[in-house]
Amino acid sequence: MLQPIKKPGKVAMMSYCGDLQGVGTIRIIYPTLLLNHLRIPGYQFQASYGIHYINDPMFYKNFTFVQFQRAATDPHLEMVRHFKKVIRNNTKTPVIYEIDDLLFDIPEWNYASSFYAKYRKTIESIMSEVDGIIVSTEFLKEQYSKFNVKVAVIPNHLPKFVWGDIVPQHTIEKKGKVRIVWAGSENHFANKNLIDKGIRGGDFGPGLIHFIKLTVDQYDWIICGGYPDELSHLKNNGIKYYGWRNIFEYPSFIKSLQPDIMIAPLQNNDFNRAKSNLKMLEAVAVGAAGIYSNVEPYKGAMMLANTDEEMVEMIYQAAKDTDLRRKIFEHDLQVVDEVLYWEKNENLQKYIETYLRFFNRCLDVDS
């Protein structure tokens, strides 16, 4: 039985970010900013974040809980142990681990593979020693429940105050070719250092690579962030390439491209099955038709491809049919509408309640 916090209640959290240009911003910084503006009668919310660990126990005396995001190294483990031994013993403040990715068995062609493999035992120790783990997907919960009995899911959401209103791309008059966009980090492909070592691979299969090569004159192919080596001869010579963008700039940049179609090919492996549906959220927020690999993150999407050949056919059909693109967008919007934005459907309240349930507490409000 969950015991409500006595009114008036103060819920305060401190988060240490492991990254400031990816999910650390999406899952820590944005909700931190929004939580401080959350208004529920009888409650005061206070959220902070940082990257430099504070070892003074008195700093934490008023926090409901503290969390470490994407901690993975030996110094991180020492911080967690210091927190438990010195700070929690003085303040009774619980410590949570926050993670958005599967850090084990990463494909060899992903440049992060060797780094996290080196620290596997350390990561397992961190997960085992914290008071609970927050993840982004049910698949991650299943994987990490091996190390901690308390694992809960908080889905990813986008901040509406950054992404703005949705303008469906099929409603915009455009000239020129259909625009097909892929946007993602460089860990979707083997980088030059790995290729030089004879390691190749990535989330673009050979059939999709071949199709792109054949259709650079037919469509406006746009790739942002990472780039597959197999298409290097076409970079800005048939394929428009845009490099990495600051995460605060990224939403307006992607919207400025006005993509008709956004694709998210993923190889079918545990690392990708653990991913969230973030790319689907982005495609809907941009107003584009999304075409995805049929892997766990995109269950429920209208266009799901089991093979390169199926994805190629879906791209071909959607590119020639504006009405089909409209149907794809409208279907996917309905699928993700409830979780699209932090500011909608009480997602911020659900966020903080997920943490509180670790400690058999909840907000005393009508859900």
Image: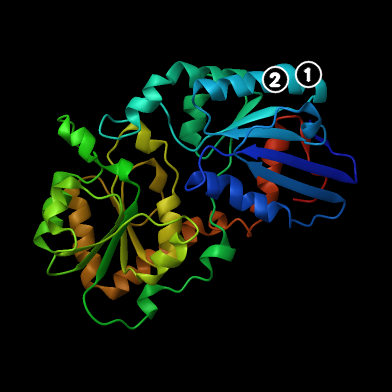
Q: Position of residue 314 (x, y in %)?
A: 23, 59
Query: In the rendered image, which quarter contains the N terminus?
Result: top right
Q: What amino acid is at disc 2?
A: Lys
Q: Residue furthest right?
A: 7
Residue 87 appears left or right of 344: right
- Residue sitting nearer the eye, 73 or 4: 73
Residue 126 appears left or right of 53: left
Q: Classify mark 2: helix, strand or loop.
A: helix
Above or below 113: residue 251: below
Q: Position of residue 14 (x, y in %)?
A: 69, 39
Above or below 74: residue 49: below
Above or below 335: residue 27: above
Q: What amino acid is at disc 1?
A: Asn
What mark, if any, has residue 84 been given in the picture?
Answer: 2
What's the residue at 58%, 18% (across, down)?
Answer: 128
Q: Classify mark 1: helix, strand or loop.
A: helix
Instruction: Please report contact status of discs 2 and 1: CB closer than 8 Å, yes or no.
Output: yes
Residue 233 seen in the current view: yes
Q: Quadrant of residue 191?
A: top left
Residue underneath mark 1: 89
Q: Residues under labels 2 and 1: Cα distance?
A: 7 Å
